[in-house]
Amino acid sequence: MGSRAIWSVNRFLQLLGSPRSDPIIIAHRGDSFHAPENTLEAAQLGFEAGADAWELDVQLTRDGVPVVLHDESLLRTTDVAARFAGDPRGQDGFRVSDLDLDEVRSLDAGSWFVADNGGYRSARDFGTLGQVDSVAAARFRSGNVRVPMLEEALAFTRDRDWLVNVEIKSFPDRPPGLVERVIATIEATDTADRVLISSFDHDDVAAADRPERRYGLGLLLWTPIHRLAEYATRLVGADTVHLSAEILGSEAVAYRRNRDARSLRHDIVAELRSRALPTLVYTVNHQAGGMLARHLAEIGVKGLFTDDPAGIRVG
């Protein structure tokens, strides 16, 4: 399929190309402010919050099944250390790639989020513990929240007529077969037209650029690249570019001193727009001075990744 023909079949790209003035809202790992990240529970809350899409991360288990998890290790977001106490795999941090699917699926992926002493990206860390209602908190503490398989997450998205950004987490291990299994799962669930695949590993993005694909491709960056539009289109084959807010100057002295869209890197967004490449920005959880999301919209950003899909609405 030609580089622009994909826009005629992929609903995620069609939404990004629509004439709406406000950026689309993408629930980063679901509604991570109010539910444990990368779970179907977080996805459901993101859907209920009105997000246009959600974003998830995918890795392979030891037996080659794509599952939805961000970290290389299971320690932060599950009870793996307690459940597999004394297991020698703990010496390497209980990596996803060292456990089989049935072992990963046996883990409690919810209790950490509502723990009173919760750590990074828990409700306590986000300051939202008091906002989690008692029914949801009980569900998270029940031990019944699981690490989803990619197949389940895509079926969830399809059944709600929703959209999803699938981020492939291959770096640094580059497990063989990850890209192929992700694509096979997308095809098996008949969800290609509502999927945007992305990765910080640009070899993976290029490898996924196949004839007649119906899924979109996004290039993830955390540092600037010279002649970015040419790189994204000619060398990688991407349809979108996903930048950190910092690349666009959100933490620069100029923006800290003058909270105005003109203080952001509008030149980068303009270059991408000239090549019909929508810019998506991560992760915008608060509007600096009350206006960062609005300023990003003003310079032409087409999508915002946020852990708080209800709270980040541009207004």
Image: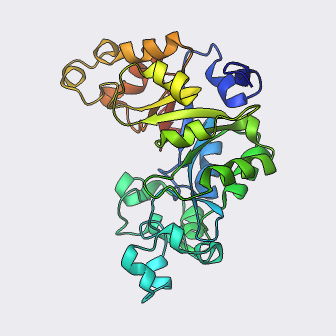
Image quadrant where residue 175 sits: bottom right
Q: Position of residue 122 (x, y in %)?
A: 41, 59
Q: Position of residue 285 (x, y in %)?
A: 41, 39
Above or below, 289 against 94 in this view is above
Q: Position of residue 205 (x, y in %)?
A: 56, 38
Q: Is residue 73 left or right of residue 192?
A: left
Above or below, 282 against 61 in this view is above
Colouring rule applied to residues:
rainbow
Q: Which residue lies at the image location 42% right of the left edge and 38% below the top edge?
A: 283
Q: Is residue 61 left or right of residue 286?
A: right
Viewer-side residue, 163 vs 241: 241
Q: Which residue lies at the image location 44% right of the left edge and 80% below the top edge?
A: 89
Q: Is residue 48 left or right of residue 266?
A: right
Q: Which residue lies at the image location 45% right of the left edge and 87% below the top edge?
A: 87
Above or below, 228 against 156 in this view is above
Can residue 49 be seen here? no
Viewer-side residue, 87 vs 300: 87
Image quadrant where residue 271 sits: top left
Q: Position of residue 58 (x, y in %)?
A: 57, 54
Question: Where the N terminus falls, by quadrant?
Answer: top right
Viewer-side residue, 21 vs 172: 172
